[in-house]
Image: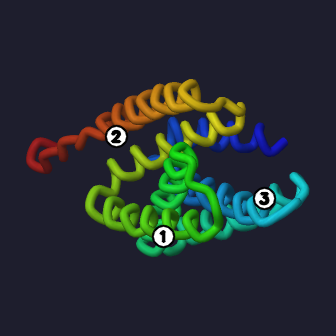
Amino acid sequence: MLAVITILLGIGLLFAGRKLFWLFVGAAGFMTGVSLVTNGGNASEPFAIIVGIVVGLIFAALAMFFKSLAIALAGFIGGGALALTLAGWFGVDGTIPSIIFYVIGGVIGIIVVGQLFDWAVIILSSIIGGGMVVDAINLDGTIAMIATFFLVLVGISVQSRAMGDKKPQPKPNKKSQ
């Protein structure tokens, strides 16, 4: 069940992470909640899902009501999650190194999101979404990296096209009406 939820959230992030900012923040919160529970011991899958949903809903609510705070949190969580993924790919293991990577990635994520919000959300949601899908279907090694890279490119392409579709409409001339 966790794999199905993760795949659905990942696909949502790939295609609508910027448009549905609350989904981006909520999905990052969901994965953080699940990771906190599953990395700390022998938690059951239903318990991990419940914790993930609760944390995800809290973060999604923050995104709706406190957008500036949510933007900073999204940058931190997204950057931290990306840093953990990269650390795992390079064989970094252990609680303390993971925390260090997460915090460094989180700080970098805050900076990137603050400077380039739309593009940062597109890129981070595509990376996280692609990673979620690949992790949920249990791909490993080079195949996982290639599949993630492909999904990231698809996500960025789809979301950037959607961003380009927002063309300002000319204002009607009051004299001609």
Outermost residue on the left side: it is 175
Res. 144 image quadrant: top right
Label 1 to label 3, Cα distance in Å? 19 Å
Between label 2 and label 3, give the one nearer the viewer: 3
Q: Secondary structure at mark 3?
A: helix
Residue at horizontal 50%, vertical 48%? Answer: 86
Contact, CB < 8 Å: mark 1 with mark 3? no
Residue at horizontal 80%, vertical 45%? Answer: 2
Between label 2 and label 1, give the one nearer the viewer: 1
Say what amino acid the circle numbered 2 marks.
Met
Which residue occupies the foreground of this view, 33 or 61? 33
| Crowd class of label 2 (few under 14; some 14 to 19; many from 20; radius 10 Å) | some
Disc on res. 103: 1
Where is residue 24 drawn, in percent x and y? 54, 53
Give the labeled residue for mark 2. Answer: 163
Give the labeled residue for mark 3. Answer: 38
Label 2 to label 3, Cα distance in Å? 36 Å
Where is residue 53 drawn, in percent x and y? 75, 60
